[in-house]
Amino acid sequence: MKHWGLFALLLVASCLQAFSLRPVLERWPVMEIEGGRITDVGEIWIGDTLRHSITIKNTGDVPLIVYKVEKSCNCTSVKLSNMTAAPGGVITADVTVDTAHKAGQVAITFVLYANTEQEEHVFKIMMNCVPRQKQYFGQTVSAGFLKKVGAWLRKLSTAPVITSHPVS
């Protein structure tokens, strides 16, 4: 009876190993990230949409499988070109960030979970979200003010213009 319990335990353990995403024989795919895991895109205007691509290459000798993506907020979208990459293959992560409700220094993170030796791969995109402003004659002018000036100038340009004076 004791032998059947040991047999059942070994059977369950082997089944778990067979259906696991973890590679057998301790061979792992290796994620090589072009440009690194932290990207600073610099300044972006508040309200603009940031689009950034990250290239992930499998430099290991077994297939890479990304099985889960988590993002830090709903303003971020991460779309993978595919969920698997053969050895030497590439996966592209297209990241889109809506900056409508962001201001100042912002760090957006997302995590890819894969069948690598370290399951979690954290990526960070840093940016400085600034209001739309311009410098004129050393003064900072907002985009809203520029729109008002533009509307005023358009009104002036449509006003009737007297080109000659009546002779009296």
Image (cartoon, grey):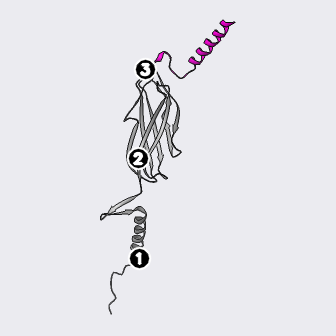
Residue drawn at x 50%, y 25% as measured from the top left: 115
Q: Nearer the viewer, mark 2 or mark 3?
A: 2
**Labels 2 and 3: the sequence-earlier one:** 3
Total number of numbered discs in the rendering: 3
Q: CA distance from mark 3 to mark 1?
A: 74 Å
Give how far across and how far down residue 158 sits, in percent.
41, 74
Task: Report crowding for label 3: few under 14, some 14 to 19, many 20 or more residues within 10 A (C-alpha).
Answer: few
Q: Mark 2 or mark 1, which has the lower sequence index?
A: 2
Residue at the spot 47% in from the left edge and 40% down from the top edge: 109
Magenta-span inclusion, residue 11: yes
The disc labelled 3 sits on which kind of residue? Answer: Asp
Does residue 27 show up magenta in the picture? no
According to the picture, the residue beneath numbered tag 2 turns out to be 127
What is the x, y in percent for residue 134? 36, 60
Q: Main secondary structure of the magenta part?
A: helix
Judge by depth and name the residue closer to the eye, 79 or 117: 117
Q: Secondary structure at mark 3?
A: loop
Name the residue tied to disc 3: 61
Give the alpha-carbon distance from disc 2 to disc 1, as whole Å: 44 Å
Task: State which quarter of the image contains the N terminus.
Answer: top right
Would you name the residue on which mark 1 appears? 159
Q: Which label belongs to residue 103?
A: none
